[in-house]
Image: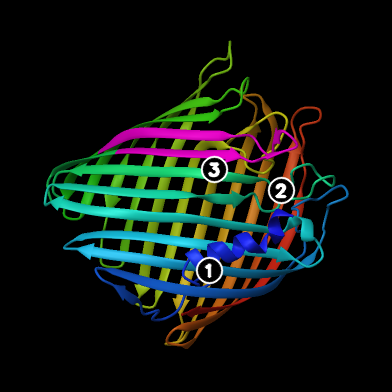
């Protein structure tokens, strides 16, 4: 079983410097680091024990409501270097997830992520990020109850943003591009999921009309492609206007509103358009408390069933609220809620089903020592689906998961 390949896990852990990224909570209070010349390395390790009452995220059929104890062993090593105002970061991580009662669902993820901020001068800056690794679609299966292993894929992801103009200037422009490809592994000669690729590029122009407040115009093009032969995708062009602000020391945010035009790559399908938006607001009433609100409406891939015979897309909106509060010097809580409502469409834009998802999470984090944290987290998901065509594939379910984790900087 791929999920129990301990030789591969051992290799990944060794490469990661015997470290782990926390699966919940705020991380250790002061992880410290190891000096490797100009590079600082921070190794961490996390051990988790919990329970998942719906491992396969199913509401009907043989796999519905299968519960199991969950064990997690994660390892990561974070590397950071700084030169002036420029920073360079990379994290090598390996994460093992095992289910005592559903061992077929076990999996190991590992990868390398990073980001770069290059301050070329006061008028030019460059940001980049990347993610290369082997991951799994947790909660999904390769072939229902016949093959319950989680579909495995290789991710190749990267982004670039070039900014021209001083951040305090009246005019400035950002040019950006992003690429994200998921290539699934094969089992018995067939891919475990639908290979997919997203390519995006565009520009955002800012006009500062008030101190710390910018008006903006953004135009971007995004291509959503299922890369297998005969699987069509979407081209989405967005025209957005809005604001970017830091109104006070307590409030920052952005708001973009406009039109998104969707052009299907399927033959003889008319273009479609809808109102689109992207909003993010952060409010800090106290130094130890912060609220974050975000919402968006957009087109995307459907990821609930990655191995579906007929690959699907989404058209919908998401709203989320997060509250992080530090009660004492060592105890903090994080509460979050999200609501998603979307239509699930085929390549021709025909709605197959609609979906509503309510999700709530709460975690309590205790910094036991300078370099060690204990966290207790709960996550609840309620997904409701209804068919819009015969055999649309609707499947509603509820899921609750608990996790107790201990994180230490080695």
Secondary element at tag 2: loop
Residue hosting label 3: 317
| Residue 228 occupies quadrant | top right
**Residue 140 in view (yes/no):** yes
Whichever of callouts 2 and 1 sits on the residue coming sooner in the sequence is 1
Residue at 54% x, 62% y is: 12
Whichever of callouts 3 and 1 sits on the residue coming sooner in the sequence is 1
Give percent across and percent down for residue 67. Answer: 80, 63
Residue 91 left/right relative to 160: right
Residue hosting label 2: 140
**Residue 218 in view (yes/no):** no
Question: Which secondary structure type mostly characterizes the magenta part of the structure?
Answer: strand
Residue count near mark 3 (Cα–Cα under 10 Å), binned few <14, some 14–19, many ≥20 = some
Q: Look at the image and say whether residue 190 sits in the magenta stretch.
A: yes
Give percent across and percent down for residue 86. Answer: 21, 58
C-alpha gap between disc 2 and disc 3: 23 Å
Above/below status of 54 relative to 333: above
C-alpha gap between disc 3 and disc 1: 34 Å
Which range of residues does the magenta coloring cover?
A: 176-204
């Amino acid at each position: 079983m791929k999920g129990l390949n301990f030789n591969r896990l051992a290799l990944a852990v060794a490469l990661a410097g015997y470290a782990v990224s926390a699966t919940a909570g705020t991380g250790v209070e002061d992880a410290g680091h190891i000096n490797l010349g100009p590079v600082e390395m921070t190794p961490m390790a996390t051990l988790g024990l919990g329970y998942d009452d719906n491992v396969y995220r199913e509401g009907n059929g043989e796999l519905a409501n299968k519960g199991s104890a969950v064990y997690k062993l994660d390892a990561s090593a974070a590397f950071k270097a700084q030169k002036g105002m420029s920073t360079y970061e990379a994290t090598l991580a390996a994460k093992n997830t095992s289910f005592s009662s559903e061992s077929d669902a076990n999996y190991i993820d590992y990868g390398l992520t990073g980001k770069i901020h290059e301050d070329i001068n006061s008028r030019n800056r460059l940001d980049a990020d990347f993610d290369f690794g082997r991951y799994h679609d947790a909660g999904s299966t390769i072939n229902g109850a016949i093959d319950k292993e989680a579909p495995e894929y290789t991710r190749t992801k990267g982004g670039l943003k070039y900014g021209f103009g001083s951040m305090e200037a009246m005019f400035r422009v950002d040019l950006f591009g992003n690429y994200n490809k998921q290539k699934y592994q094969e089992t018995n000669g067939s891919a475990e999921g639908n290979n997919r690729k997203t390519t995006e590029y565009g520009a955002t122009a800012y006009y500062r009309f008030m101190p710390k407040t910018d008006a903006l115009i953004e135009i971007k093009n995004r291509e959503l492609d299922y890369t297998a032969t005969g699987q069509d995708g979407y081209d989405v062009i967005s025209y957005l206007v809005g604001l970017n602000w830091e109104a006070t020391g307590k409030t920052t945010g952005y708001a973009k509103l406009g039109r998104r035009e969707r052009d299907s790559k399927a033959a003889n399908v008319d273009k479609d358009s809808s109102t689109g938006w992207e909003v993010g607001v952060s409010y800090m009433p106290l130094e130890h408390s912060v609220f974050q609100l975000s919402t968006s409406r957009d087109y995307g891939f459907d990821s609930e069933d990655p191995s579906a015979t007929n690959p699907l897309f989404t058209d919908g909106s998401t709203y989320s609220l997060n509250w992080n509060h530090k009660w004492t010097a060592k105890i903090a809580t994080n509460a979050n809620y999200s609501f998603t409502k979307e239509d699930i469409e085929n390549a021709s834009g025909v709605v197959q089903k609609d979906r509503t998802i309510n999700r709530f999470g709460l975690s309590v984090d205790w910094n036991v020592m300078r370099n060690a944290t204990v966290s207790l987290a709960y996550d609840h998901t309620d997904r409701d689906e209804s068919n819009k065509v015969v055999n649309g594939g609707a499947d509603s379910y509820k899921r609750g998961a608990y996790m107790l984790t201990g994180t230490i900087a080695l």
